[in-house]
Amino acid sequence: MIARLAPRDHTVILGGLALHYCEWGAIDARPLLLLHGITGHARTWDHLASAPQPAFHVIALDQRGHGDSQWAPGGDYSVGAMAGDVERLVDHLGLGRFLLLGLSMGGRVSIAFAGMHPERVEQLVIVDIGPDIAPEGMERIRSAIGTAPERFTTEDEALEYVRRANPRYDEVELRRRVAHGLTRLSDGGLAWKYDKAIREAMRLGTRREVMNLWEPLARITCPTLLVRGAESDILSPEIAKRMLATLPDGRLVEIAGAGHSVPGDQPDAFAVAVRSFLA
């Protein structure tokens, strides 16, 4: 049994917004910033981040409106706004060049940041997302988020709901995702931590992204690993192929037995692929 590192929690006010993040490892090691997906939070990275890794100082951000970070005034969850949060955080931490890894929504934020600041990203990992999203996957995500219950009586009830929507997800990872993704209500029930405005935008079909991410993708200069779940309905083989043709130094790895949520579906295989690339 591997002795796992415990996270250290911090909250800082940046750009007028309270942002929470967790960190693992020595602060003088190579910095690795992790960005979660649209319904995730910083603790979804525990499996990757908590393994003893003397080579890395791992930082996992609760992006605005998620986890223990503040909800965005006006419901601004655009890629540009979240990339601005990343810039303010790494400036606050005094990070010059660093390693960046983003899943899904976090991958889109990573593309935007790395394209705007190519000199600051030493290596980049983009997990199962691209500038375009396969239509069938986008419809599935919209439906799942838009029809999500707003309240649960127990954590087990929430766990069963999330398990039905994520049948490949590793059980230990799923339980962690749910436990850290809920908040206790005054009546004793449980609700999602992430902003209800995100679910409302999905229900109403008003969530739009104006940034064309093919443009910043083409400006990324660092070695980039594109991780695709072999059974993903979000990152199609065609989109992945175009991304590799656009990136000056890109490579692809497909993880067998994984859908869109690669780190949750196959945590060990994902960790091996990432560590091999970053090493």
Image (tube, helix red, strand yellow):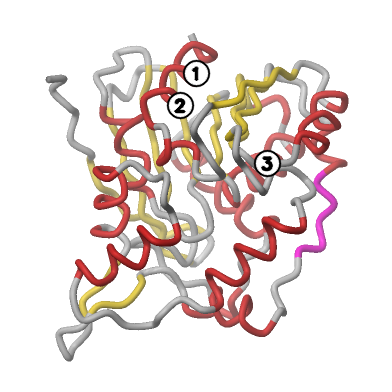
Q: What residue type is labelled 3?
A: Phe
Marker disc for residue 273: 1
Residue 133 within the magenta-colored segment of the rendering: no
Q: Is residue 176 above or below residue 227?
A: below
- Quarter of the image that includes the N terminus: top left
Q: Mark 2 points at which residue?
A: 270
Which element carries disc 3, helix, strand or loop? Answer: helix
Q: Mark 3 points at which residue?
A: 113
Q: Nearer the viewer, residue 25 or 124?
A: 124
Quarter-wise, where is residue 198 in the image? bottom right
Kindly identify the amino acid type of the residue bearing the numbered disc 2: Phe
Task: Assess whether mark 1 and mark 3 are in contact (beta carbons under 8 angstroms).
Answer: no
Q: How crowded is mark 3: few (under 14 residues within 10 Å), some or many (20 or more)?
A: many
Q: Are marks 2 and 1 in contact (CB under 8 Å)?
A: yes
Q: What element carries label 2?
A: helix
Kindly report the distance in space between the C-alpha atoms of the residues bearing marks 3 and 1.
23 Å
Which quadrant holds residue 201?
bottom right
- Going by the numbered disc 1, the residue's amino acid type is Ala
**Magenta region: which residues?**
209-213
Q: Determine which of the numbered discs, if any, sits on residue 184 in the image.
A: none
